[in-house]
Image (cartoon, rainbow, N blue to C red):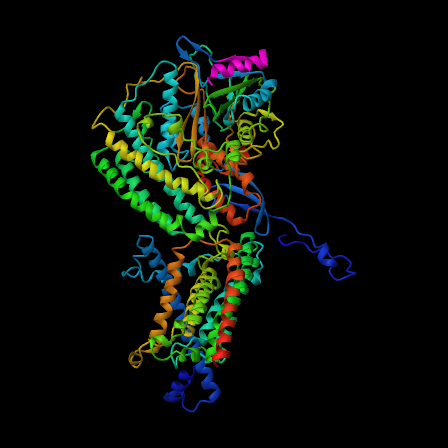
Amino acid sequence: MILPKLQHAPASRPGDRARTMKSELLHINMGPQHPSTHGVLRLFITTDGEVVHSVTPYIGYLHRCAEKKAEGNTYHQYIVYTDRMDYLSAMNSNWGYCMAVEKLMEINGMGVEIPEYAEYVRVIIAELNRIASHLIAFGTYGLDIGAMTPFFHALREREAILNIFEKVCGARLMYSYYVVGGVKWDIPPDALEEIELFVKLFPDKLREYNELLTTNKIFVERTANVGVIDEDLAVAYGCTGPVLRGAGVKWDLRKDQGYSIYDRFDFEIPVGGGDMGTVGDCWDRYWVRMLEMEQSLAIVEQALQQMPREGEIMAEMPRRLKIPNSEVFFRSECPKGELGFYILSDGGDVPFRCKVRSPAFHNLHVIEEVGAGQMISDLVATVGSLDLVLGEIDR
Amino acid sequence: MTPAEVEAGLREVFGDRILSSSAVEEGRDTAWPRRIDVAVDALEEVCRYLRDSQGFDRLLCVSGIDYEGYDESGKGKHIEISRYEEDGSPTPTKPGSGDLAVVYHLHSRAHGGEVAIAARVRRTEPKVPSVGQVWPTALWAERETYDMYGIEFEGHPDLRRILLPEDWEGFPLRKDYAMPSRYHDVPLEGAPLAVRTSPREVREEKE
Amino acid sequence: MEAFQQMLSQAGWAQGMQPWALSGLAMLFAGGTILGGVAVGAMFFIWTERKVAGYIQSRYGPMYVGHFHGVLQSIADGVKLLLKEDIWPTDADKFLFRIAPLLVFTGAFLSFVVLPFGPDFVGASLDIGLFYAFATSSLVVMGVIAAGWGSNNKWSLYGAMRGAAQVISYEIPLGLAVLPVVMSVGSLNLGTLAEAQRGWLWSWHLFNPIFFVSFVIYLISSLAEVNRVPFDLPETESELVSGYHTEYTGMKFAFFFLGEYADMFVVSAIAVSVFLGGWYTGIPAVDAFVPAPLVFILKSVFLVFVQIWLRWTLPRLRVDQLMYVCWKVFIPLSLANLFIYGLIRSMVG
């Protein structure tokens, strides 16, 4: 069953039996209920001792027919389903979808002018959500490596962001805050104060995280030179976001595609440089996320300064949105990578087809390539460094 | 490189195997980024050409489309997704006749261009060459398209369902798909209350 | 045990008893005391662990049971575990599955017999005390293997194999590290080893440079010996689900749990008696009126705290790195240490 089977051969010389000993690979299911698969991911692995021979991911345990539902819901109604995709950064998913619909309207000449104030609100909230998502990535990565404390510290700061979101839109996880043409509610003054306080306090916390985990010798030993995804591999497998940037590719839609008002802010695109080992190892991906939090914070800070005191939060929108025959594929930079919406309309009030390009789906694909030949512990480290959210993979 | 240049290049090499492309009509774009429809048999060559000669090194997304019920006139009549009879069995749907299509969205890091390549196939014979050899990322995306639309990708090394169980019947994102009310005798969410609440024995008697 | 025997022989109701009965009764008393002490102590350590973890992670930890900072939380947990359903995996090896938690707990519990809590407070003052303690605490590994094999779970088996490899490997530097001290004192009796450190603070073995190296090796190896972070590879909840005790529930799980915490105390107590001056405070004048067991237990509890502190601060090593540290760093280092000490002694005399 588990142990290599001993086959008894006629023993003529000592040592002969050792030669006929046959060993088998061990097949193990890692998941769907496993602590470090970040949800209901099932990895079917074959191992030889501690070394993993092959990894086959099985997904779909969290499939909720999101694309089918899009065909039965109006453009506005579908926003709530985008929350449930990447539930750790629901604001970014909302925004990506809303921008896709806005783009669809724009190419049809029904352009919506998003009020400037609303654009600032959108940027601030989305960047805060990016920080919250990366905090979870940082904390759970600590858990995967065996350090439990960073997780609680990360959740403590995430809590502050969730409190802000609660004041802004009333929800703590599923926001549905962005609507086509703007945002649903204005940021209340006390929430604005809280954001300012958070911006002031957070750099210290980041320093604390780096002291606690990033530069820890054991952590570096566990993540440097492990799970290397180089530039070619990342591009070939369609990896995006921190996985692509960790491989040393300077590619960020916020700067390179320049949607919304990101051209008004001064921020860097952090890329992995192989500081501790090889370019594109687990440590690089982790480090890119840590640096991105800093950059997001800088964007929030600048947005708070530039933001007009008050303004409209929503553009004039038709009550019933009907879009003529046309299609659009719009991507936005989410914490996990490029979230794309492909929307095909045929004049009705529901999309004829809405396909979601989920970043984590393509980021997970690469594990088939990278996982083989690693040790079990390294596989856990690699899966963790991809920062998967199964809600988005399975949709 | 603009989409128009890409298209011109393609037409030069492949001639009439490039079928059509979305264009600006009456002051509005019908597709963004530009969508170029190619003949199914030319798809793999086109993709190879785009990758090697035009620098499209990233495949972003593979989407299936079922054109059953697509309204060209722009009225968008509402299509019933799926219904159940009173006893909980799915309402049989009329088999569709519309085409299926696969759309590939490409992006180039070299010149930043984006373009969509599409191939339409007949519903009766949904076979498309796999582009997994061109961009490995297509392997999973094609599995998903197969899972949802039943489009077979020829030359795919491992064409299995990816999101749904392997013994699932039918292709759910097709417009003529009838939603089953049970899966392995487990009533499905959304099935009529009669199916979900009646005890197993009663249901077996009925059957 | 001698103390109990003496007390009994003076007690009125025991007058006229046969000597063998007397010594048997004394054994029962001593065993009962140790068992009670171990159970209560382990519960206290579990509570400490949760409070310290809470403090490090900027949260409270248990707060309600027992009114004062959840002091009775462990008892509540114990009651809960007692009432839990006892689940057996379908194809488990019944005998091994049942015996494993007992082995783990017994291994930890047996070592308490030789711990010198004070000049007179020792279960059995064995001349091979140190050897005995190491031997019994490696009984734990038998339990770990039995649990991993008996559970019929592949993850558990992984945990068991890792546990066996790790504990057996780290026994070597653990043993080698204390040898210079044993050479210096000339005894394996833990009481004698502690006795040798009587006097001022600097007479503790810790402050001898050679022994200090030994102490560091011992401290780190002992973490591996009791499967604590950063060496908790047999459990590794993020890799092996819960390692060798994945399939255990209820009281069987509680035995593993108690065993782990008892083991933590054992290795700490050995470190205290070998390196940290046993029951001596380091100031001769104070020694006269401070109860010896109190000093000994406080020092041990401090070392247990250090283990807890490390657990909530550090990530975990990979299995090959763990083995690397043992075979390529600690064993050569402790051998060199032993050799140098032997050289010095043979030259100085």
Compared with B98, C77 (above or below) is: below
Does the rendering let one see residue A77?
no
Image location of residue A295, percent across then percent down? 34, 36
Q: Image check: A368 left or right of A324?
A: right
Q: Nearer the viewer, residue B158 or B11?
A: B11
Compared with B111, A390 (above or below) is: below
Does the rendering let one see residue B131?
yes
Image location of residue A47, percent across then percent down? 59, 48
Q: Residue furthest top?
A: B26
Query: In percent of the image, x 36 and y 17: which residue is there?
Result: A106
Does residue A232 belong to the magenta stretch?
Answer: no
Q: Residue furthest bottom?
A: C16
Task: Look at the image and give the residue range highlighted in magenta.
Answer: B1-21
Compared with C341, C69 (above or below) is: above
Query: In percent of the image, x 53 and y 38: which residue is there?
Result: A58
The number of discs equals 0
Where, quadrant-wise, is the C terminus of chain A in this rendering? top left
Q: Residue furthest front?
A: C347
Image location of residue B129, percent across then percent down? 60, 23
Compared with C294, B185 (above or below) is: above
Q: Nearer the viewer, residue A224 or B125?
A: A224
Image location of residue B40, percent across then percent down? 59, 18
Quadrant of res A331: top left
Q: Image check: A395 left or right of B16?
A: left
Chief secondary structure of the magenta portion: helix
Q: Nearer the viewer, residue B190 or B121?
A: B121
Does residue B17 belong to the magenta stretch?
Answer: yes
Query: In percent of the image, x 57 and y 63: which residue is there?
Result: C95
Q: Image check: A1 left or right of C114?
A: right
Q: Image check: A336 left or right of A183?
A: right
